[in-house]
């Protein structure tokens, strides 16, 4: 069994592909023993990847670009779970419509992060001016993400990631917009490694992507399994929050798992608009389509989708229905 280290930037629904691959036993099926290493945010998990302290991570497109810029890195996206924006916009009590969000304080953890990129993309499509129609407030990362973003003394509006919008609703915040409805190509939840690992351990990368793809498919198509995964890793116990979170994220997952060329082009455009990079970068700088292509050629997707014989998955673990007593 080959040991691999996976850096985790968070334990939200966006990291579910990794958790599903662990709980479904798909890494072990591929001869991989996964060690999960927690970090505070994608910037730190990607820094660990580039420094050689991890072999893989789950990331989002803009953060990969920025990590390579900061650390002269070679991080590269090798598979995609979600190639559309999957964030939501929540607002403090008293704000209930999009128009009421103009000129308000929009909280982010750090400049040029994926959340600020989401704000720019949304504003472009709404015809808003990010320089006039929002005050960007950097809240930092010294406390829990939700506590920082829902601090009404500093923040009126925040970008949420499931299960956050439903947790925020329990504190009186209202989900105003679901950015998934914009249907904009954007490299969201994805598997990343380094070009160094692809050169030195190509078979490891191939086996990782097989397990990752299997995890995505199981999470998306097996609600009981997906909700159980979210319950275990997010720490959320509210059945309604878990079900809503699974539905919100599972509907956006899937496809053929190729890294999104157009999604990375859009991410690069937004980062250039923010002044984070001097000019848009070619998508090929930070993606590699070869691993998913190899998985497709060998017929792995046909097996996963049921076209060829596939082993029967064991449930993980059975959970009571909503409202039922344990």
Image (spheres, helix red, strand yellow):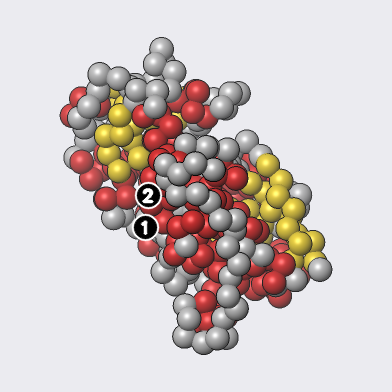
Q: Residue at x 45, y 44 (%)?
A: 324
Please say whether residue 13 is visible from this viewpoint.
yes
Residue 272 in the image, given as x and y percentages of width and height: 41, 45
Q: Residue at x 48, y 81 (%)?
A: 306
Mark identifier at residue 251: 1
Q: Which residue is mark 2?
A: 248
Mark identifier at residue 202: none
Q: In this orientation, which residue lies closer to the viewer: 310 or 296?
A: 310
Within 10 Å of disc 1 (Cα), the crowding (few <14, some 14-19, many 20+) is few
Q: In this orientation, which residue lies closer to the viewer: 73 or 78?
A: 78
Query: Where is 175 relative to 69, above or below?
Result: above
Q: Is residue 102 left or right of residue 236?
A: left
Split into 4 quadrants, where in the image is the N terminus? Answer: bottom right
Please say whether residue 117 is visible from this viewpoint.
no
Q: Quadrant of residue 121?
A: top left
Kindly state the secondary structure of the residue where label 1 is placed.
Answer: loop
Residue 19 in the image, given as x and y percentages of width and height: 60, 54
**Tag 1 near tag 2, CB within 8 Å:** yes
Distance CA(mark 1)–CA(mark 2): 6 Å
Q: In this orientation, which residue lies closer to the viewer: 95 or 270?
A: 95
Q: Is residue 312 left or right of residue 148?
A: right
Residue 182 in the image, given as x and y percentages of width and height: 26, 50
Q: Is residue 162 left or right of residue 294?
A: left
Kindly state the secondary structure of the residue where label 2 is placed.
Answer: helix
Q: Residue at x 71, y 63 (%)?
A: 196
Q: Quadrant of residue 220?
A: bottom left
């Amino acid at each position: 069994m080959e040991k691999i280290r996976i850096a985790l930037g968070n334990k939200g629904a966006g990291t579910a592909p990794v958790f599903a691959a662990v709980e479904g036993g798909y890494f072990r099926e591929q001869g991989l023993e996964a060690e999960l290493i927690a970090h505070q945010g994608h910037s730190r998990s990607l820094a660990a990847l580039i420094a050689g302290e991890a072999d893989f991570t789950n990331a989002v497109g803009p953060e990969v670009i920025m990590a390579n810029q900061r650390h002269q890195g070679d991080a590269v996206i090798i598979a995609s779970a979600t190639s559309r924006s999957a964030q939501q916009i929540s607002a403090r009590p008293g704000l209930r419509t999009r128009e009421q969000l103009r000129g308000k304080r929009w909280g982010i953890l750090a400049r040029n992060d994926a959340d600020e990129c989401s704000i720019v993309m949304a504003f472009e499509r709404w015809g808003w001016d990010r320089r006039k129609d929002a005050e960007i407030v950097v809240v930092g990362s010294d406390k829990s993400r939700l506590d920082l973003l829902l601090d009404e003394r500093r923040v009126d509006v925040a970008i949420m990631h499931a299960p956050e919008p439903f947790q925020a609703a329990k504190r009186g915040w209202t989900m105003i917009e679901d950015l998934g409805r914009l249907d904009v190509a954007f490299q969201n939840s994805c598997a990343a490694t380094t070009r160094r690992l692809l050169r030195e351990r190509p078979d490891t990368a191939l086996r990782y992507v097989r397990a990752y793809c299997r995890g995505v498919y199981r999470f998306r198509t097996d609600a009981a399994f997906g909700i159980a995964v979210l319950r275990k890793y997010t720490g959320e116990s509210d059945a309604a929050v878990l079900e809503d979170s699974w539905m919100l994220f599972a509907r956006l997952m899937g496809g053929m798992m190729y890294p999104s060329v157009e999604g990375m082009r859009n991410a690069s455009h937004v980062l250039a608009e923010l002044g984070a990079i001097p000019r848009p970068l070619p998508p090929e700088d930070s993606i590699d389509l070869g691993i998913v292509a190899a998985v497709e050629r060998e017929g792995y997707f046909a097996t996963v989708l049921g076209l060829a014989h596939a082993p029967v998955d064991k449930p993980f673990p059975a959970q009571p229905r909503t409202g039922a007593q344990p």
